[in-house]
C-alpha cells in the first residue's frame, strides 16, 4: 500500500473485536492476520490466505521474535523445575516462617513488590511474580484477576521507569536512529515525565493499600471470596520438598545475566545490546542453574524423568502461540503502515499543549491496535522527534508522551502479548483480565493525558 488508509487499521480491529466477542484469542488473532494479508494482496482471497501461512512462518525469520518465543518456552521449563524441586514452596514457607505473608493483603503486596524489584525484563517480571504469588492468592481467596492486574501494572511501567535493561537499550537505539545526538540525555528527561507509567504503578500500590476494588474487579473478588479455601500445601505429604534456594538463586541468575547479556551483545555498550538475545541467555542460564541445584540437593527425580522441563514448556506453549500470532499481526500491520496512518490523524499546526496529549493518544491507539508497546515505540518515536524539532521544543516531553501512550495502549489491548502473559502467569481468564484491568488503566490514563497538556503549556 503506497498510501495507508483506514483499511490498514481493519486487521487489528477485527482481531480486537473478535477477541472481546468470542473470548477466543487464537482464532481472533489468526482472523486479523488473515484479513491483513488479504488486504495487502488487493483483496485476492486465495493469495492472501497463502501469504498468511508464509507470514506466520516468517516470524521465525526475525531473530528477536524467535528468541522471545523460545524464551517463553524456556521460562515455562524454569518455573516447572523451580516448582517441582520445591523452590516455590520453600520460598513461600520461608516468607511465612518470618511472618511476612500471613494474609491476603500481604500476598498482594508480595506480587506488587516482586514486580517492582525484578525490573530487568517485563516478561520475566510477570512470569516470576505470577508463579510465586498465585498459590498465596488461592490460599487467601484473592482473585487471580487482581494478581494479573498487579503484575501487569508493575512490569512494563517499572521497566520503563528503571531503564537499566533491554527497554532502555531499545529506546536509546530508536532515539539514536531518529537522529538524536544524545539519546541517553533525552531518555533521562523522558523517564520522570512518563506519566502513565508513574500513575499506573501508584494506582496499583494504592489498590493494594486501600482495597480499591470496583467494577469487574469487585465482582471477581467476590467470586474468589466465595470459593472454598485452598488447602495448605505444607500439610501435603506429596508436595515437593525443597528450600527457598531452589528459587532464589535461579531468579538472581536471571537478574544478573540479563544486563551481562546486553553488555556482551553490545560489545561493552549496554545500550547497543540485544534485549531478545539477553533474555534468552538469562532464562537458559537460570534453567541450568536450577537443574544443578536440584542435583546438588539430591532431587534427581526432577532430572531423571525429564518431566519438569517438558511439562513446563508445554504449559506455556499457548502463550508462545499467542505471541507468534501477535508478532505476525504486528508484521502485517507494519506492512500496511497502520501506525503511520493513525499518526497522520494528528492535526497540522497544533500547539504544544494540544500536541503532547495528541501524541499520547496516537501512541495509545497504535499500541491498542497492534498489541505491542515496543512496535509502537518504533513507529511513533521516529515521528515525534522531528515534530519536536519543528516546534523548537525539547525532545524529552514528546518522547515521554509516546512512551506513556505505548504502555497505556498495550495495557488496554486484549491482543497485547504482555496482557496475555499476565493472565496466563496469574492463571486468570484472559478476557476477564482485560475487563478487570481496563478501568484501572483508564483511571491512570486520563490524568496522564491531562498532565501532558499541562507540560505542554511550559515548553
Image: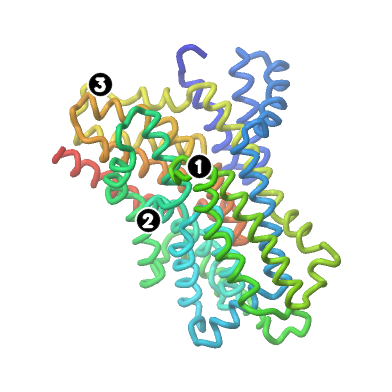
Q: Name the residue under label 1.
A: 267
* CA distance separating discs 1 and 3: 42 Å
Q: Which of marks 3 and 2 is nearer the N terminus?
A: 2
Which percent across, then down, holds residue 208?
41, 70
Q: Which quadrant of the structure image shows residue 252?
A: bottom right
Question: Which sits in the foreground, 251 or 386?
Answer: 251
Against 104, residue 203 (above or below) is above
Element assignment for label 1: loop
Question: Which sits in the foreground, 403 or 392?
Answer: 392
Q: Which residue is at the far left?
A: 458
* CA distance separating discs 3 and 2: 31 Å
Which percent across, then down, holds residue 186?
29, 40
Q: Which of marks 2 and 1 is nearer the N terminus?
A: 2
The numbered mark at residue 348 is 3
* CA distance separating discs 2 and 1: 35 Å
Q: Which residue is drawn at 39% across and 66% down?
A: 207
Front disc: 1 or 3:
1
In this rendering, does residue 28 appear at all? no
Q: Residue at x 38, y 59 (%)?
A: 201
- 358 left or right of 364 in image: left
Q: Residue at x 18, y 44 (%)?
A: 454
Q: Mark 2 points at which residue?
A: 200
- 18 left or right of 294 in image: left
In this rendering, does residue 120 appear at all? yes
Q: Residues within 10 Å of mark 1 (few under 14, many from 20)?
A: few
Q: Which quadrant of the structure image shows residue 308?
A: bottom right
Which percent across, then down, holds residue 271?
43, 43
Q: Which image quarter is the C terminus in?
A: top left
Front disc: 2 or 1:
1
Q: Residues within 10 Å of mark 3 (few under 14, many from 20)?
A: few
Q: Which of marks 1 and 3 is nearer the N terminus?
A: 1
Element assignment for label 3: loop
Amino acid at each position: 500500500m503506497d498510501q495507508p488508509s483506514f483499511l490498514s487499521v481493519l486487521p487489528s480491529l477485527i482481531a480486537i473485536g473478535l477477541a472481546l466477542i468470542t473470548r477466543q484469542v487464537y482464532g481472533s488473532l489468526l482472523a486479523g492476520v488473515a484479513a491483513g494479508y488479504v488486504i495487502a494482496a488487493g483483496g485476492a482471497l486465495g493469495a492472501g490466505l497463502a501469504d498468511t501461512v508464509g507470514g506466520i512462518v516468517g516470524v521465525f525469520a526475525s531473530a528477536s521474535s524467535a528468541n522471545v518465543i523460545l524464551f517463553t518456552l524456556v521460562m515455562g521449563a524454569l518455573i516447572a523445575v523451580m516448582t517441582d524441586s520445591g523452590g516455590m514452596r520453600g520460598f513461600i514457607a520461608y516468607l511465612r516462617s518470618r511472618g511476612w505473608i500471613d494474609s491476603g493483603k500481604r500476598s498482594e503486596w508480595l506480587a506488587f513488590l516482586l514486580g517492582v524489584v525484578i525490573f530487568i525484563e517485563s516478561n520475566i517480571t510477570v512470569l516470576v511474580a505470577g508463579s510465586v504469588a498465585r498459590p498465596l492468592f488461592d490460599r487467601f481467596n484473592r482473585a487471580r484477576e487482581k494478581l494479573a492486574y498487579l503484575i501487569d501494572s508493575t512490569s512494563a511501567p517499572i521497566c520503563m521507569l528503571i531503564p537499566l535493561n533491554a527497554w532502555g537499550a531499545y529506546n536509546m537505539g530508536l532515539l539514536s536512529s531518529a537522529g538524536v545526538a544524545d539519546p541517553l540525555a533525552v531518555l533521562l528527561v523522558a523517564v520522570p515525565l512518563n506519566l502513565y507509567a508513574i500513575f499506573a504503578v501508584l494506582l496499583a500500590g494504592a489498590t493494594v493499600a486501600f482495597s480499591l476494588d470496583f467494577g469487574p474487579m469487585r465482582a471477581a473478588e467476590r467470586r474468589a471470596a466465595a470459593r472454598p479455601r485452598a488447602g495448605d500445601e505444607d500439610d501435603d505429604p506429596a508436595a515437593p520438598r525443597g528450600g527457598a534456594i531452589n528459587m532464589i538463586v535461579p531468579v538472581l541468575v536471571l537478574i544478573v545475566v540479563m544486563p551481562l547479556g546486553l553488555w556482551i551483545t553490545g560489545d561493552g555498550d549496554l545500550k547497543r545490546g540485544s534485549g531478545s538475545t539477553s533474555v534468552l541467555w538469562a532464562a537458559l542460564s537460570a534453567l541450568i542453574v536450577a537443574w544443578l541445584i536440584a542435583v546438588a540437593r539430591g532431587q534427581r527425580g526432577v532430572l531423571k524423568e525429564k518431566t519438569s522441563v517438558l511439562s513446563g514448556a508445554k504449559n506455556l506453549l499457548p502463550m508462545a502461540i499467542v505471541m507468534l500470532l501477535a508478532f505476525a499481526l504486528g508484521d502485517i500491520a507494519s506492512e500496511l503502515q497502520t501506525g503511520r496512518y493513525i499518526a497522520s490523524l494528528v492535526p497540522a499546526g497544533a500547539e504544544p499543549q494540544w500536541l503532547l496529549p495528541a501524541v499520547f493518544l496516537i501512541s495509545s491507539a497504535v499500541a491498542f491496535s497492534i498489541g505491542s508497546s515496543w512496535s509502537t515505540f518504533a513507529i511513533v518515536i521516529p515521528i515525534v522527534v522531528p515534530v519536536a524539532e519543528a516546534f523548537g521544543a525539547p525532545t524529552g516531553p514528546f518522547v515521554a508522551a509516546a512512551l506513556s501512550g505505548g504502555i497505556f495502549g498495550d495495557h488496554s489491548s486484549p491482543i497485547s502479548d504482555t496482557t496475555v502473559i499476565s493472565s496466563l502467569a496469574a492463571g486468570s481468564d484472559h478476557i476477564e483480565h482485560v475487563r478487570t484491568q481496563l478501568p484501572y488503566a483508564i483511571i491512570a490514563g486520563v490524568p496522564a493525558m491531562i498532565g501532558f497538556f499541562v507540560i505542554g503549556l511550559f515548553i
